[in-house]
Image (cartoon, grey):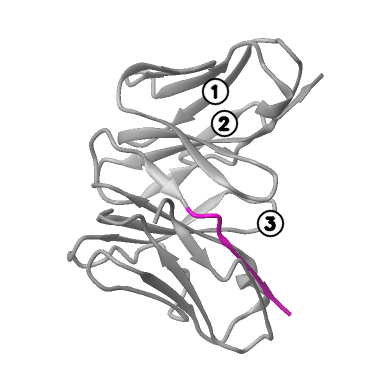
């Protein structure tokens, strides 16, 4: 597609439920990042995928968070047993290649509210 | 202490003013990004720098690797420039990005 697409754009869920967030990167982009932005706070790195390499999961805040990406296509971020502190905007970004002169394109985010 | 510090935190300017936003970082980096976040959350990547200076329209970004400092300048500011500007650095020891907390810019007509 023309840009990074994220779905859903908004999600309200009850505490304790599982949620799945989706990111469609720009076709051909090998690098994909997930970030989280809590209200009034800066961006937090969550996880990074580069091609078929093992993902860098060092930013995931707990084992309730997991993410998958098949090859260079869609990625899903799953949050199990959601808590109120998980409420945030979850942003995805992709890049044509890692390092070098290319910048990153961000999706419009998924606003997650845990009630 | 945050790895990336931005200043000022908030900035109000009159239309037409020259604006400077500063970013200092404490880690070794492979690249520095300036991002623009509009109300509603959309984020746009403005620049990616590893040295020197880049210019795009009224926006200029500079970086001094030795001093671990970058500046974003906006010439002839306009109300549509009102947004949060975020400095982010890519660590040179891994895949980690570190983000500043942003500078909220309001340009008054």
Task: Tell me the element at label 1.
Answer: strand
For the point 43% across and 80% down, the residue is A63
Q: Which residue is mark 3?
A: A39
Number of other residues with Cα within 10 Å of mark 2, as a class: few under 14, some 14 to 19, many 20 or more: many
Measured from the top left, where is residue B10 in percent x and y? Answer: 72, 30
Subunit under mark 3: A
Pointer 1: what residue?
A: B22
Question: Mark 3 falls on what kind of element?
Answer: loop
Q: Looking at the picture, do discs 2 and 3 lie on one chain?
A: no
In the rendered image, the residue lying farthest to the front is A1
Q: In this rendering, which labeled residue sits more in front, label 2 or label 3? A: 3
> Is disc 2 in contact with disc 3, using a CB cutoff of under 8 Å?
no
Q: Which residue is mark 2?
A: B6
Q: Residue at x 28, y 53 (%)?
A: A29
Say which element carries label 2: strand
| Residue B106 in sight | yes
Quadrant in which the C terminus of chain A appears = bottom right
Q: Are marks 2 and 1 in contact (CB under 8 Å)?
A: yes
Q: Residue B1: x and y, percent?
A: 52, 42
- Relative height, residue B101 to residue B51 (above, below): below
Establish if B11 lies above or below B1.
above
Dot 2 or dot 1, earlier in sequence = 2
- A99 sits to left or right of A109: left
Q: Which residues are magenta?
A: A107-115
């Amino acid at each position: 597609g023309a840009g990074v697409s994220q779905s859903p754009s908004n999600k309200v869920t009850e505490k304790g439920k599982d949620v799945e967030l989706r990111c469609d990167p720009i076709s051909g982009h090998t690098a994909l990042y997930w970030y989280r932005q809590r209200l009034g706070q800066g961006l937090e790195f969550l996880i990074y995928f580069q091609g078929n390499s093992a993902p860098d999961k060092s930013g995931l805040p707990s084992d309730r968070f997991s993410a998958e990406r098949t090859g260079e296509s869609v990625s899903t971020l799953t949050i199990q047993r959601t808590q109120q502190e998980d409420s945030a905007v979850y942003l995805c970004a992709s890049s044509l290649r890692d390092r070098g002169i290319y910048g990153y394109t961000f999706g419009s985010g998924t606003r997650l509210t845990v009630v | 202490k945050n790895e990336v510090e931005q200043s000022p935190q908030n900035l109000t300017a009159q239309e037409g003013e020259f604006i400077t936003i500063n970013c200092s970082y404490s880690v070794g980096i492979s690249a520095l990004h300036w991002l623009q976040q509009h109300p509603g959350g959309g984020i746009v990547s403005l620049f990616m720098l590893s040295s020197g200076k880049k210019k795009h329209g009224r926006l200029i970004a500079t970086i001094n690797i030795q001093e671990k400092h970058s500046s974003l300048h906006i010439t002839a500011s306009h109300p549509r420039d009102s947004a949060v500007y975020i400095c982010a650095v890519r660590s040179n020891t891994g895949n980690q990005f570190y983000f500043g907390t942003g500078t909220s810019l309001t340009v008054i007509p």
